[in-house]
Amino acid sequence: MKEHDKNEISELLRNYGQAYNDGYQVFVKDNEIAVTIEPAQFTLDLVMKNPTKLSCTISLQRQPRPEMQKTPVKFPDLPPLTADQLNEVDQIFVEKKQIYVLTDLNQMLVKYDLTQGYQGLASQQMAFFTSRKDQLKSIHHYYNAPYAVFFYQDEDSSWFSGKFAIWVNLKTKVVEGANWMSFPLNDGGLLSEDDFNLITKSLGQNGHFGAYGNVSEGLASLMQHSDIEIKNSADDKEFQIEISPKNGYGHTTIFSLIKATGEITAPLTMHMIPEPEPLDIEDIGLEALELE
């Protein structure tokens, strides 16, 4: 494909929000791409490079006016996991005990308990930033050798809400990935054990800011009373971390952590006060109104 075609695709994609700011390149990292060029439109056939091998087709109208259409996301044509493979996954999950994952929208750190196996995972919260109560999830699985791939989705959710996926290498007995699937793929996903340990060690050594806060207790302990966001810097050399109290009252601490050394740089601490509850006129009472 010629460079001017990529540039035109990029310009068309940027019409559809911040997720597409990088244009054509937004798909390159995570997908195999086949492009069909026609006078009236570009057609992008995308297949994820990760073991899920999900696919999607995006059509970009060139004329008479720009328009984007997405097909429903498709699973690959692969066999479901056998009973023996499912038992193997459960054994791996129980031994692993838990995983830490960064959510797709804001890279908030959450923990999933694996001790109840692949079915027990379905009972845990996977949909965030919604007032709707979490519902029972359907589980879809298949074998993409050597990977066992699982999808969890609320029964009434659409394909575009981003299904949670987790994949396990049955050869190495390792949980290799987890994320909410979308095109383009959002930032976030599984926080590796090495990265978790690096951050925890660095907090223990460098996370006491005196009167301005103390985050030295480590990630596992902090998660009990704090919301934690962890993002990769653009050059992938630093973690950008924000730690805030769950109740909205206390210190919010923002800093960068250099991956190569564990050094914490440019710490910033702010004191947070929760917003007051809105007044309910019925709670004021008629007597208070009569005084006016």
Image (cartoon, helix red, strand yellow):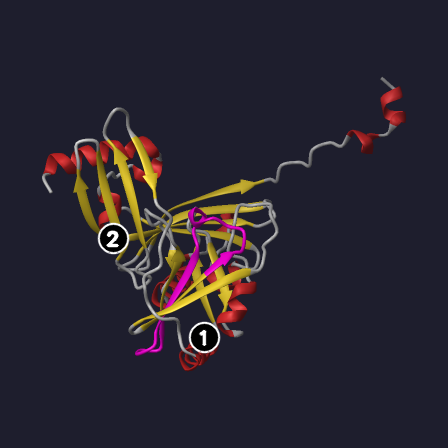
Residue, x 31% and y 49% (percent of image)? 56
Packing grade of label 1 (10 A; few <14, some 14-19, many >=20) is many
Mark 1 sits on what residue? 93
Residue 144, by quadrant, is: bottom left
For the C terminus, the image quarter is top right
Residue at 9%, 39% (x, y): give it. 2
Residue 104 position, x and y percent, is: 41, 50
State which quadrant residue 248 falls in. top right
Q: Is 95 left, or right, of 174 in this rendering?
A: right
Q: Amino acid at mark 1?
A: Phe
Residue 81: image x %, image y %?
Answer: 39, 74
Vertical arrangement, residue 238 with respect to residue 95, above or below: above
Span highlighted in magenta in the image: 152-175
The residue that label 2 is drawn on is 31
Label 2 neighbour load within 10 Å: few <14, some 14-19, many 20+: many
Q: Position of residue 285 (x, y in %)?
A: 86, 29
**Three-letter amino acid code of the residue under disc 2:** Asn
Q: Where residue 274 is drawn, which disc sits there?
A: none
Instruction: Report the quarter where the N terminus lies.
Output: top left
Residue at 35% across / 55% down in the picture?
A: 74
